[in-house]
Image (cartoon, helix red, strand yellow):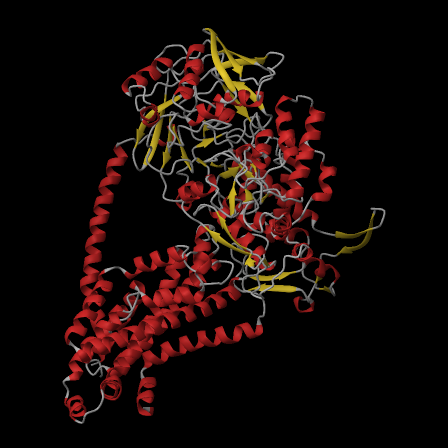
Amino acid sequence: MLNTIKQVFRSPRFLIGFIIFALMLLTVIFYPLFVKADPLAMVGNGNFFKPGTYVNVSETVTANRYTLNVDVSGAAKLDRQLNESDRSKMADWLIRFGGVDEAEIDTSDSVALVELWKNNYSPDADQPGLISTDKKSFERLDKRIDEILSSSGIIIATEEEDGTLTESETIDETSYVNINDLATTQTFVLGTDNFGRDVLTELVAATTTSLRIGLIAGLIATAIGLILGLIAGYLGGLVDDIITFITNLFTVIPSFVILILISYSVGQSARGVGLVAMIIGFTSWTWTTRSVRSQVISLRNRDHVNLSKLSGHSMFRIIFTDILPYIASYVVMALILQISSGILAEAQLSMLGLGPATTKTATLGLMMNWAMQYSAHLNGSWWAYFPVILTIALISFSLNLMNTGLDQVFNPQLRD
Amino acid sequence: MKMTKKSLLAMLLAVSMTASLASCGGNTTTTSTESTPSSTTSTEESSEAVSETSSETSGETETAGSTPRNETLYFAGQQWGTINDWNPMSANSNNAMAIAQSDMSRVLIYETLFMYNMLDGSLHGLLATDYEWNDDQTELTVHMNPDAKWSDGTPVTAEDVAYTFDTHVKYSSATGVDYATYIESVEAVDEGTVVFHSLCDDTGTPINPLKVLEYIPKVYVMQKAYLQTVEERNGSDAEAMKLDKMEDLVASGPYKPYYDDDQKVVFVRDDNYWGQAESMWGKLPAPKYIAHTIYADNNAGQVALAAGEVDVCQQFITDVQKLWEEQELPIMTYMDEAPYGLCTTMPTLWFNLTKPGLDQVEVRKAIAMAIDYDQIIASAMSNQSPTFAQVPRSIMNPTDGEQKLIDKDALADLQFNGKDIAGANALLDEAGIVDTDGDGIRDIDGVNLSYKAECPTGWTDWNASLEIVAAAGKEIGIDISTYFPDTNTFYNDMTTFNFDIVMNGTNGASVSNPWGRAMQLLSSTYNDLEINWSGNWGHYENARADELLALIPHETDEATLKEYYTELSQIYLTDVPSVSLMYRPQLFYSVNETVWTNYPEEGDDIPPTDCTDGYGIAALYELELVNP
């Protein structure tokens, strides 16, 4: 036994798969110990906030200030915030509608350009041939320039009881705060989703759910498959015929269709994690039955089995001691694949809106479903769906890698 | 040996990938290795076959019904399936692009007497020029535009208007059934004058003058001669009349059917359109063709809009401002800032007032208090709605015209702001509705407060809103699960009173609103209907509300109206028979300026009704090509 395990771990494929899977398991176990937030809490008031650290604005006003002698005033600021295309847009407008001579314009001198712009641009100017969206983009650019110009010397004022504002301080352009001094920061490593939920926390919770569903579904499917396969293969005859008949029946009907029908008929309120896992388990056992049965048939006429029979051992004893150990490696491999396919089945179900309820559990499929419904893939919110896809891919990749690793160890034909 | 090892690894990787992709677990690696080559070939074969046929079909469609890009205005978000008929009397027409008889009817093919402009609430003449009431509002006289002609060149007369109404009533179309209870008859006095006679009660006062007025911007005028042809071929059978496809239609609008299949629908301009007379538009609409590709879903439509393949898009788009702010596309909405559109309707959560628990005002109010409306507006609605802090709750929509009809100070104490979990819990505890069996869900007489909140599947923003409602329920110990059936099932459930909680829109802007919306929210007159499409789906009943609702249509004094509407809003906010979740535009409106420009935007007098509905069609006459 120990020797077998050693051998298995010597297989690089198994080892890589195992490490990936173990890392995910560890994350799933330890992350919730450190981050206690509710994975379904809608924190962000809006769709798809970008990944990053969010700093409380009012705290930055009161926090400890440091003066850094970095030039952020005037020209340097304009240079940094107005990029090449902004400047050529400005130049273009000035020439076309502002009556400025092309020779006067130097796009590399942002200060002069902005001065020209402020003197000549007016949103109400007659702009023949310009479409509304372009007019609006110039208005936005003008507003942005105003903001850049005016952000020097922001004044903080406090409101008195009678409603008058009293200037309390002016914020200097060279003032900085250290992010470590701030107590109320919120970091979204993977941003937020369409409901404003923290994607990373949700992803960890979803992976836990998915692994649980995969494990339950895999265990159920493998158990049913194994038992039916053993009985059919060992007993043969009428029992075999009946079981094979039923198995074939279930093989022919696409299990995913049954899955959809059952999920739909039980209704959403009943569709918890356990039930979904059970439905998946009960619809995906057929291939295990078939393979176990064929292996048992080839085993049952071996000499050691016949010897046991002659010795008068009971059927259960023969199955457990003389047959099961020979197919154990296969069963483990089948279980691994069943887990992987159970996870994928849940993802598919939830994508169709037939998985667990959105407000009760986080699952990988639900995350994908909502990201797609809110067209995250169209508006550049990669963080809402890509990590989910990656997680699903890594789970099934690592499980399949472990499976092929095991196969390499146990299957004599593949051994090198 | 090394080579074999490498190829083996490659093969194993390929196998594991295929296995994981196809999710066919359970079989041994050996079997899957064997089955992989055959299955791969078969998929390749079938995909080749598919691509062949699809290239063939796309080749066909390019010739059939294809139109020059710079003469065509492309739409998205109106038509979602192959057109089934052109019949304005049909009960199950899906021809949204041509037939939409609503408060602002789509007047591309068929035309109404007047066009409603939701910006100022005015009626602009179309087939008619003007209207006037007599003093006791029993007769509405409408004068026809003498220039109006049918597509066959004959004039549109008063006789046509009268015959259209008679036909609707005679064959009990939905329109006929609705208006026969308010309009006694439509009389053609002479060729150019129509008189609508209000149906009166015993005392001789009209039952509802507002509904009479509502008819004229809503119902399409059909040609008498053509209707007689249709009657003849259907043997005057009511069912057959409503099922007639009317593909040979005679209408008066600026466009006529040109091409349609399961990929698209195209209308072509009628260059003899009567509206180029000086008395109407004085010219023809700019686009020669109106086309609507039938997209699979919202995402497909959005991609097409971004690519400039769609000019006018009636779809909800998440973070729509990113299209111009980040992607810098020539796309705009009616307003540059949130809420981006003109919100005139209020998607509302209707409680079934006969369900145990929901029959108690405390439970309804607690749910209403707990819901996080800001979250719904910011995330589910992507900020495309004013918040309830900006426009406090009442039975009014956010437009100025309606808001001035209520006394906001009188309603201030009744407002609830949402996300008030503590308040909602306290309210339920005080009412003695507690969790007695310790399962985390409150119960009444041992029955858990457990409800199903329902809206059609695929209505993304509504689905998300209901999820946020369900999350609120979880916080206050009321189990609300979401249920998203297909649209037909949903409407079936809603109209037959077979639901716990449904989400549905309210009336938007029209000549008969806010009265019509007040009816929807509070009137018990719909409670006895077997199939109720009209309103008050939760069967609320309040005698005082009914009384007020009956008074309003006869009242013209604004101060009295304000009093009535304020009292109705007080009743509404006190009893919470339903609760609005957000404000919403009647039509979403995003336009792309790649080909066409000069679309209506904030500040214009043309409403953003997608260049097709009500007075919004005036936009078609203003459009210009970006590169003529």
Residue A68 against residue B558 in the figure, above or below = below
Q: Position of residue B339 (x, y in %)?
A: 58, 41
Does residue B207 appear to the left or right of A315 in the view shown? right
Which residue lies most toward the right here? Answer: A162
Whether residue A62 is visible here, answered yes or no, is yes
Q: Quadrant of the N terminus of chain B?
A: bottom left
User: Relative to A17, is A131 on the left or the right?
Assistant: right
Q: Is residue B466 left or right of residue B151?
A: right
Q: Nearer the viewer, residue A16 or A305?
A: A305
Q: Residue at x 43, y 78 (%)?
A: A22
Give the number of callouts: 0
Along the line of sight, which residue is nearer the eye, B386 or B442?
B442
Q: Nearer the viewer, residue B336 or B149?
A: B149
- The residue under the point 25% across, 82% down is A327
The percent coordinates of residue B135 (x first, y second) are: 63, 12
In the image, farthest residue toward the top? B190
Q: Is residue A25 left or right of residue A412?
A: right
Residue B158, placed above or below residue B312: above
Using the image, determine if residue A139 lies above or below residue A52.
above
